[in-house]
Amino acid sequence: MSIGLRSKICFTCGIEFAVPPKWFEARVECGKPITCPNGHKIFSQWADGKSREEILAENDKLCGERDDAQKKLVSALADVDRLTARLDQFEADRRDTDTDTPASDPTHSTPRRGKNRKAVSA
């Protein structure tokens, strides 16, 4: 008795493995994923009709896109941190300026967030 096996390739790790055809067909019919030996879920319809090279090339492309997106995210988060630090410094400088001049000094008018704000007098 000879049992033929159906070759599959994992999109995540690129491993090639084989499964029994009847088991594979049952999984396809019910739409359940199969799992590669490394534990990654593979939906059977994705791997059908593609060569190992095509799958690995697609995997490499998607990994590159993911890496690019992660770099953009890191850059954007760094920008947020930098701008937050600048805003904090600006607000600290403004507070220092407000406390350097007594509020009772009628010759000094310190604008406070917004246009045409008058100085607070004691």
Image (tube, rainbow, N blue to C red):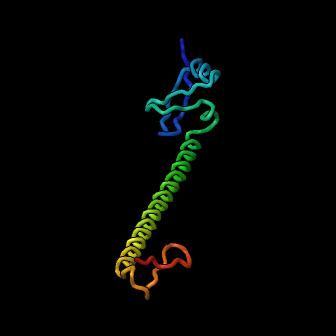
Q: Residue furthest front?
A: 122
Q: Position of residue 84 (x, y in %)?
A: 44, 65
Residue under the image location 54 percent in, 45 percent down: 59
Residue 93 in the image: above or below residue 66: below
Question: Quadrant location of residue 110?
Answer: bottom left
Residue 103 in the image: above or below residue 5: below
Q: Position of residue 71 (x, y in %)?
A: 48, 58
Q: Residue furthest bottom?
A: 107
Residue under the image location 59 percent in, 43 percent down: 54
Residue under the image location 43 percent in, 32 percent down: 38
Q: Nearer the viewer, residue 25 or 72?
A: 72
Residue 6 in the image: above or below residue 89: above
Q: Nearer the viewer, residue 59 or 53?
A: 59
Q: Residue furthest top?
A: 1
Residue under the image location 55 percent in, 79 percent down: 116
Q: Position of residue 105 (x, y in %)?
A: 39, 85
Q: Position of residue 82 (x, y in %)?
A: 43, 67
Q: Nearer the viewer, residue 58 or 1?
A: 58
How many numbered marks have been drawn onto this rendered protein structure? Answer: 0
Quadrant placement of the C terminus: bottom left
